[in-house]
Amino acid sequence: MAAFPHLFSPLRLGELELANRIVMAPMTRNRADARGVPGELMVAYYAQRADAGLIVAEGAWPSAAGQAYCRQPGIATSAQIDGWRKVTEAVHARGGRIVLQIMHAGRIGSRHIKGEGVDTVAPSAIRAAGEVFTDSAGMQAYDMPRELAADEVRAVVAEHRQAALNARRAGFDGVELHCTSGYLPMQFMCSGTNQRGDEYGGDAGNRVRFVLECLQAMADAIGPGRVGLRFNPGNTYNDTADADPAATHAALASQAGRLGLAYAHVMRAPVPDIDAFGLAREGFGAALILNDGFDGATAEAAAADGSAAAVSFARHFIGNPDLVRRLRDGLPLARFDRRTLYTPGAEGYTDYPAAEEAEA
């Protein structure tokens, strides 16, 4: 019997059939090429980790305006779709399941990354504090964004629909909408970054409208049972702030819960006065993937008591390509090297050994 029997029981989330309840969380790793095309290195990386019940592949941009980082993959061009198809085929060949996180960065980005002529856009023309690394010019301040007109907002919703269709063309089992970490959906949700006076701004119901329209468009395109979302109440990453993040996310969870989606992927709140998991369960329902700070024992407890349908791991999957086996067999977990999280090449990416290789 597995060390953690509940974690190793099968699970169905919408149309997604998982062999176990161990999920690989999406992590930006910056290993695509300069055109945002996944290559053989990314094929190897994801294939190594295909024993996960579900892989949520790193955030991919749905259009050039949505790119945040150098060497971040996209899902907008034929070359990107073809590159991702090699990834999904490798994961499926090992019996795995994989969905793609769709991530529009909004105001987080730089013309030194996107290239000249590509606008940086946002709900409101409010520049984010901070800097971003660029391969061509080193550290650069975030661009001053241009406020999207209402018809442009609807065009961005259509880009998300197309991104979901492109992901299915690439062989992904589904998609996840990135609604946290200060990117475009969260920029719409937060009162500090959304100062609009139209139907996409104002009260919480209006500020979550963009997210819900994206989710509905993606669900209409590929089926709601292949669509999930990720959120994190209280997250202030990338200079986002909301007057009442619990109320805003409660509005999102309750309305998203009516769409018949596959799951909600919920990160533990970074502030003690918000119970993100309880908020999600009350509003969205029981199809929850919980994230942040779990080890094997606490993940098993969450699966056993029903608070989690599944649990996702991020940093443990970096240094442990065979994390599922290590948890199953009670093997010690390896550490990872923070210095190589975002650097090009295989070092700190595909060169972490499996347990038996490390012993040898």
Image (cartoon, rainbow, N blue to C red):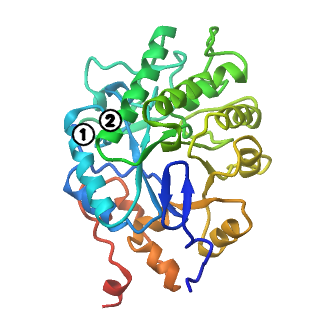
Say which element carries label 2.
Answer: helix
Q: Indicate which label's residue lies in the foreground, 2 or 1.
A: 2
Q: Is residue 33 visible?
A: no
In the rendered image, which quarter is residue 206 located in?
Answer: top right
Amino acid type at circle 1 is Gln
Which quadrant does the C terminus fall into? bottom left
Q: CA distance from mark 2 to mark 1?
A: 9 Å
**Label 2 is placed on what type of residue?**
Asn
Measuring from the top left, give residue 342's x and y in whole percent.
35, 53
- Image point (32%, 35%), residue name: 166
Image side of residue 89 versus residue 151, left or right: left
Tell me whether circle 2 and circle 1 mark residues in contact (CB < 8 Å): yes
- Identify the residue position indicated by label 1 in the image: 80
**As drawn, 82 above or below 96:** above
Neighbour tally class for label 1: few under 14, some 14-19, many 20 plus, Cα within 10 Å: many
In the image, residue 23 lies at what x, y percent? Answer: 50, 61
- Residue identifier under label 2: 166
Closer to us: 157 or 241: 157
